[in-house]
Amino acid sequence: MPDERAPVVATIQRLRTAIDAVTAALVDGDEASLLALEGELVGALGATMRIHAIDAADRELVRAELQHTRAALLRCLGLGATLRQVGLESLRALGVAVDYDRGGSVKPGIRRARDVNARA
């Protein structure tokens, strides 16, 4: 529950809650939830960016909440990176294009996703 005397803490908690929800959607493989969470994440980031001052009395609360939020972000980033790598390796195993040149063209010898028969 946000501390009523520290609206900055509540703003940072909102961001952490959004990040935790993104992490949960990644764990569940819930694409619809990921897409739905975009607006909340953008709103929470926007609110955080509008913080211009922190009352001296609230600094310890804010510091603690920022540490929790940073830990949540690192968990989410780590999970996202792991899932991305698993996806890329799965595509590579199927021979699907995951390597592009600087112009955005598929490197020679690699099939595009549309060329793969997923039911085979």
Image (cartoon, rainbow, N blue to C red):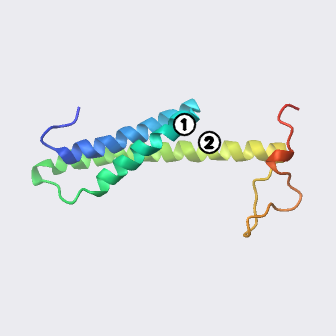
**Does residue 9 lie above or below 27 as drawn?**
below
Q: Position of residue 78 (x, y in %)?
A: 53, 46
Circles 2 and 1: CB atoms closer than 8 Å? yes
Q: Is residue 70 left or right of residue 93?
A: left
Q: Which residue is mark 2?
A: 83
The quarter in which the C terminus is drawn is top right
Q: Which residue is mark 1?
A: 26
Residue for point 30% across, 48% down: 66
Q: Residue at x 86, y 38 (%)?
A: 117
Question: 80 or 104, which lies in front?
Answer: 104
Q: Under tag 2, what secondary structure?
A: helix
The disc, 2 or 1, on the residue closer to the chain's N-terminal end is: 1
Q: Quarter-wise, where is residue 56 in the image? A: bottom left
Quadrant the N terminus occupies: top left
Q: x%, y% of residue 37?
A: 46, 39
Residue drawn where x is 75% and y is 61% of the image: 100
| Residue at the spot 14% in from the left edge and 38% down from the top edge | 4
Q: Callout 1: 10 Å neighbours few (<14), some, many (20+)?
A: some
Residue 24 vertical position relative to residue 48 in the rendered view, above or below: above
